[in-house]
Each structure stands twice: as structure tokens, then as C-alpha cells.
Amino acid sequence: MASVENAPDAGTVAVVGTGTMGQGIAQVALVAGHRVRLHDVAPGRAEQAAEAVTARLDRLVAKGRMTAAERDAAAGRLHAAEELGDLADAGLVVEAVLEDLGAKQLLFEALESVVADTCLLATNTSSLSVTAIAGALRRPGRFVGLHFFNPAPLLPLVEVVSGHATDEATAVRAFELAAAWGKTPVRCTDTPGFIVNRVARPFYAEAFRLLEERAADPATLDAVLRESGGFRMGPFELTDLIGQDVNEAVTRSVWEAFFQDPKFTPSLAQRRLVEAGRLGRKSGHGWFPHGEAAGEASGNAERPAPHTAPRHPAPRQVTVHGSLGPAAVLPELLADAGIGVVPAHTGHTDVHADEGRGHLTLPGGARLRLADGRAPAPGEIHFDLALDYRTATRIALGCADDVSEADRAAAAGLFQALGKQVSVIEPVPGLVVARTVAMLADLAADAVARGVAGEADVDTAMRLGVNYPRGPLEWCDALGAGWAASVLRGLQGAYPTGRYAPSQGLLRRSGPAGGQS
């Protein structure tokens, strides 16, 4: 358990705003050993919140994560502050009120007249500018963003956000305090969405775009991203959990803050969902039905099943042409499954084998190629990227219109022989996982290049903040120099809107290979 003894400027922590997040932050500070004062503008709300936090501590005791003596000591350090003036002795004030710029500015202006000049002022905003909130302050240098993730007591990540006027000493102090509380802090500058909500946009946006293009249904897209990409949840089920209104508002806020950059364009399909009041679990229906409508009241909820191809026999052998890049392990896996793997004849010029675009040839003549950002050419079947082809349990395929039924069946049977389920989707450029990972890598590299955060902090934030199986930059490097940029080049050719143009940060990271397509 974290201890306040090693925390800088240990003392009283005030939390203003007593909703779920405010209560969670108060619990974190209490468990770390601080005196905590809770304040809310609504009469009686602070006292109610203090009782709720005490009940949270009781649950920790029941779970064996805190002793009764520790609970009693923590409860003794917790006080409701009915007046703002009761926060005068705070060494840190964390604000967790509604996401309204004017309300936050007025609050901090009032706090400046109450607390000492040495008091650290912090906002837990997730969508507003830290710089703008501090803009009206006398001493904006002591103001910083401390963005916790919900639920604050459980999730380790804290984004420490420096506004334009934040002193370096302030950011360091906030970082050290969050670390002393047992959190994993990361540093970033004040940019729309900070790290997580900026870099994560493609995870949702690409899936929603694929739905709008009728590439596949939500259940199938979720399954492919989970079972091939290794993501904890698919974007459709995750936004149902978050709330469609909340997720769409963050997307729209980031898009508008970036002056409607096409890389952040919101989804019309999600907007219609919000307009229909289908907000996810909290309303009983989102992308999927929830609650009694889905049978949950009786414990017999049936989620829509992903599209899964029927079983097909695997071909007896395939021919390997060139390198399969990130899928280079496939020939070994096929051989282990008893499928003959025949190298292409040397000295033979293959008009279909571009440099860096190896493929497998099926007995019927169709070429099986890793998705590369382009739509399948005539005679091609594209298979999707996997986090690990050894352990992936599902693979998506996209077939050119002229591919025979026999070759479609052979491609499905090939992956089924490796113990994987197969989802055949429309032959869209980049399929599902490949285009999503390429875009995540692009936004991550762009954030680093623009000085938003360091590489390690970006990868840490995405692993801990949204449970990605790998940090986007770590993943980008593992896929090989230029892979992500090449995929985006292909997508840019298919969708020449600027959305998929590789950023300069990604191109510099990719080296000479980044310009290849």
C-alpha cells in the first residue's frame, strides 16, 4: 500500500466535486495517508460523499485489502468541508467538477483567495484545456492537470498535464506525488485529449468507418479486434460500456480542438445512435441490446454472434513467394499443421510479387497476402494482421470479387487448420486490425514528434489507460520499419482525404522504408 511518508509536501489534500471520480480520488489520497477534505457546492453533498468513501473503505476491509485499524485511521482523516474557506490548509486541491470551462475557472479563481501560495492546484479534466482553465489565475505556474482514469482507486494511470504556464517544478511535484500514491504517472503537454484520448481515437473511428462501409457487423468487428488484434474489448462493446454520448462527445471535442483535422473525424453512425437515445448499457441499448431486452434479467442474455465461416478442408500444400513480413511465422505454423509449404522457384519472375509484398499461392491460383492498406487486387485474398499468429484465435479474410469459391474455401480451411476461426468480411483496404494498428502507430508517433510526450510515456499510457496489448510505438517497431507507413500509404490511395496520410513523425521513425507502398 502506498504511503504518504515518501510523498512530497505530504499533508492535507482537498477534493472539490464529489461525484464518482471525486470520491475515487479522495479514496486514493486517504489510503496513501493524507488528511482529505471533500467539498461540493451542493449543500449536504460533501457529507454524503464522505459517507460513501467510508463505505468504500469498509468494502476494502471485507475484501482483506485493508485492516480495520487502517480503515478507522483513514476515516478519521476524512472530513466534509461545507465552505470553500475550510480548504485553507490544503497542500493540494484536486478539482473534479463538471466539464464546463467557465465553472472550473470561477472555482480556481475563488480557491486562489483561500489557499496558500504554496498550494498545488490541479484539475482532473479529461477534455478541456489545462492552459485555458489556468488562464485567469494570478499564479498559473502552480496549476497542473492530474487526469485520473475511472475507477481511480483501481486504474494505475495518471496523466500529469503541463499547461502553457505550468512551472516545471509544479509538474515534477505532481508526478512525484502521484507516484507516491502508488500510481503510474506519465508526463504530457496540454494537447487535445492529452495522450490516451488523443492516440486512442482510431480504435473507435476505424471500426465505425468499417461499419459505415458495410464491411462487417459490430459483433464481427469486435471479435476480430479481440481475437486477432489482442485487444481486451472491441470498440462497439467498449463504447456501449463507456456510454455512446460520452465517447462521441470526447471524439467531437478532440476533432474540433484540432480544427476538424480529418484524422479525428467523428462517426455519423455513432451520432445517429446518440440521437436515438441508444447510449449503451445505461440506456438498455447501444450497438447491442442490454438489460431485460437482451434477457439479462433472467441470466440468459444472448449477445450477437460474430460471422464465422463454416469448416472447410485445408489445401494439401501452398507455395510461398517472398517474405510475409509481420506474418513470417505462418509457413512454419502451416508446416507444423501438416500442410505442405513449397518455396517458389528461384529465377522465376513473379509479376504479382512486389518488393516486400510476399504471399502464399493456393492450389487454385489465388494469392493469399497480408493486408497492406490496398484493396485486394484481382485474384487476391487478404488476411488480417494478428498480434501473434501463434495464439490468435480468429483471422479476418477479404477476397477480391473474382476469387473462386474453391479458393475462398481453401483460404478459410488453411487458417482453420491452425485452430483459428475465420471471419470473411468485405474486401476493404487494410481490413480491420491492420488499418487500426497503423493509425494508432501514426497518432502515437505524431504525438511524440510534436513533443506531447516521450515514447515510453505514450506506450505506458496506452497499455495502462486503455489496456492495449502493446504500446502503439512498441507494436510499430515490432512490425518492422516502414510497415505502418506503407499501410497508410495504401489507405491514402484508396481514401485520398488526408485522413490516412502518414504523419512526419511516423515517416521519420520508419526511415527510408516509410516511403514505400
Image (cartoon, helix red, strand yellow):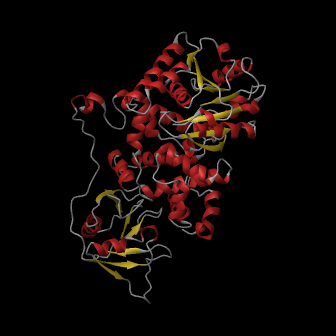
Q: Residue furthest bottom?
A: 347
Above or below, 78 relative to 1? above
Above or below, 131 relative to 370? above
Q: Position of residue 161 (x, y in %)?
A: 65, 39
Q: Residue furthest front?
A: 69
Residue 127 in view here: no
Q: How many marks?
A: 0
**Residue at image point 62% right, 70% down:** 512
Q: Position of residue 514 (x, y in %)?
A: 59, 66
Front-most of 416 and 309? 416
In the rendered image, the quadrant that contains the C terminus is: bottom right
Q: Position of residue 398 (x, y in %)?
A: 36, 61
Residue 471 in view here: yes
Front-most of 191 and 515? 191
Q: Residue furthest top?
A: 43
Side (left or right) of 247 relative to 343: right
**Residue at image point 66% right, 22% down:** 102
Q: Position of residue 462 (x, y in %)?
A: 52, 47
Side (left or right) of 252 relative to 303: right
